[in-house]
Amino acid sequence: MQQKGNYFRALKILHTAMLAGQVLFLLIVLYLVFSHFVKPMDSNADKVMQVATIVIGFACVFGGIQYFRKRLEKIKEGTLLLAEKAEQYRAANITQWALTEGACLFTIISFQLTSNYSFAVLAGMFIIYFAMLSPSKLKMMIHLSLNEAEVAGLEKD
């Protein structure tokens, strides 16, 4: 259980840490590829990795979006207490973030294996999308149809 007033702070810290991990990993791999510390795979493998990365990456992102939407519907339909709604909302966010991060990490690994900079660009796009998923009180109010008093109550519990 969390201490008082830490609901959004903890969620933001987790999101920021996951985002920082992706950015740092991309920067390290960019340095390794640019410095020629890693040797690229052959061009046939590059084509396979392009298809695999696009399919897996977008499947993860789309799956995360769909999962999040379905969880929100269940949370709204249920007769849960506010604290239970908040916990399920947090779990839905974390699952969506994990799927998006998985897509990004797979893309960065593909970049490392192939030295194809288009993977770095795609990873950057996944990172930007991930950053847009940052949690906020306003998003929670909209997603769960809550009012300001209810959201403020989470910080006091």
Image (spheres, rainbow, N blue to C red):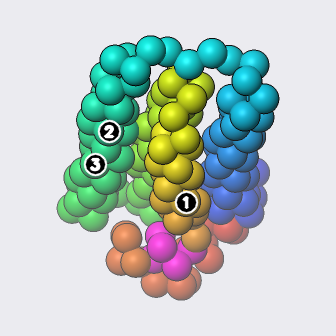
Q: In the image, is residue 46 part of the stretch drawn in magenta?
A: no
* Segment colored magenta: 137-141
Q: Are marks 2 and 3 in contact (CB under 8 Å)?
A: no
Q: Are marks 2 and 1 in contact (CB under 8 Å)?
A: no
Q: Where 74 sits versus 63, above or below?
A: below
Q: Nearer the viewer, residue 52 or 84?
A: 52
Q: Where 79 sits versus 44, above or below?
A: below
**Distance Cα–Cα, label 2 vs label 1:** 16 Å
The quarter of the picture where the N terminus appears is top right
Which is more foreground, mark 2 or mark 1? Answer: 2
Reading the image, the residue beneath label 3 is 62
- Inspect the image, locate mark 2, and give the three-letter code of the amino acid beneath it: Ile
Q: Dot 2 surroundings within 10 Å: few (below 14), some, or many (20 or more)?
A: some
Dot placed on the residue nearer the N-terminal end, 2 or 3: 2
Residue 99 horizontal side relative to residue 19, left or right: left
Q: Position of residue 156 (x, y in %)?
A: 69, 68
Q: Which mark is residue 128?
A: 1
Q: Position of residue 114 (x, y in %)?
A: 51, 24
Q: Dot 1 surroundings within 10 Å: few (below 14), some, or many (20 or more)?
A: few
- Regarding residue 60, the answer to whether it shows in the image is no
Reading the image, the residue beneath label 2 is 54
Q: Which mark is residue 53?
A: none
Q: Where 8 sits versus 66, above or below?
A: below
| Residue visible at 27% across and 64% down in the picture | 76
Q: Position of residue 73 (x, y in %)?
A: 23, 60
| Residue visible at 57% across and 74% down in the picture | 137
What secondary structure is found at the residue carrying circle 1? helix
